[in-house]
Amino acid sequence: MPGGTIILQSHRESGLPDWIDACLESVRAWSTCAGYDYQFTGDEMLQRVPSLWREKTAHHSQIAADLGRLYLLREALENGADQAVWIDADVLVFNPEDMTMEAESAFAFGRELWVEEAGRSHHVRRNVHNAMMIMKPGNPVLEFYIHAAERILDRLAASDGPAQVPAQIIGPKLLGALHNFADFPLLDDVAMISPAVLNDIAAGGGAALNALISALPVRPGAVNLSASLIDDDSIARRAIEQLRFNPDLLSPHRDEESP
């Protein structure tokens, strides 16, 4: 796979909800239309993570997955890619023309605008997400990110008993802490969808969705549906239908009255 851009994804290959399949297919189709290479890796991605670390974090498989994706990015660059892009399996590309993947620097992460209910209103929490990451050869951050993640897992492995840490310890938690000091370049191609926003998208509108729209700097090309927080697959299906039917639903320039 010499040169060019490669899109990387991974997920278990059995027992997937049908809406996850729809998300994966949307990324594959977009990759083909954009002329990008595409690589899907199944459970074997986790086998790249040492067994002791996998066992220690077995209650939060996301921790090992967050490291495994970094190894995939590094392998892609070592194999000659000009640009390696990680995209989570629960990302739906609903607006392909706005999926630019145009990182001006040698790396970039996603901007997270997370909408939470706050009494009768909604609060937008700003952070960094790793549902989409772009890495180019010679970038200054990937090896450090891997090193920092491995150091964290080493400390967890040395502790007694199961690791009592959040699932996002080497994902958004670590990235957010580093971003506060290093000010990473962030892209808006993939918007993070909280449960409150997902419900509103499925319904065609609502206060949480409006809160996200008001915070978006541009219309995203895709959304991360936050599969780990979805209890009802039918809501995810309805949200996908709504976004496909009306890709302007998340446009910050919509001229629409709040419900």
Image: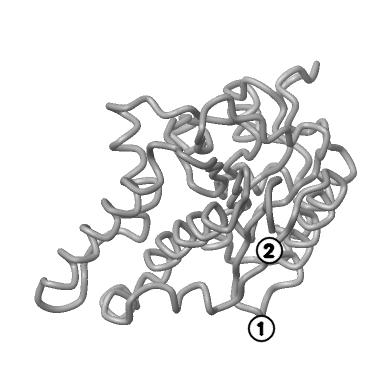
- Find residue 189 and report its horizontal and vertical position in percent: 66, 35
Instruction: Using the image, determine if residue 244 lies above or below residue 213.
Output: below
Q: In which image quadrant can residue 8 be found?
A: bottom right
Q: Which one is nearer the viewer's eye here, 244 or 62?
A: 62
- In the image, residue 6 lies at what x, y percent? 67, 52
Does residue 112 appear in this view?
no
Q: Quadrant of the C terminus?
A: top right
Looking at the image, residue 138 sits to the left or right of residue 91; the answer is left
Label 1, on which residue? 14
Dot 2 or dot 1, earlier in sequence:
1
Q: Which residue is mark 2?
A: 39
Nearer to me, 252 or 116: 252
Residue 3 visible, this orientation: yes
- Residue 163 percent across, percent down from the top left: 21, 70
- Compared across the picture, whether 163 is left or right of 92 comes to left
Amino acid type indicated by mark 1: Ser
On the rendered structure, is 251 left or right of 78? right
- Whether residue 246 sits left or right of residue 250 in the image: it is right
Using a 10 Å C-alpha cutoff, classify the residue at mark 1 as few (fewer than 14 neighbours), some (14 to 19) or many (20 or more).
few
Whole-Å distance between the Cαs marked 2 and 1?
17 Å
Badge count: 2
Q: Amino acid at mark 2?
A: Gln
Q: Are marks 2 and 1 in contact (CB under 8 Å)?
A: no
Applied colour scheme: one colour
Mark 2 is surrounded, within 10 Å at the Cα level, by few (under 14), some (14 to 19) or many (20 or more) other residues, namely: some
Q: Quadrant of residue 126?
A: top left
Q: Position of residue 1 (x, y in %)?
A: 69, 59
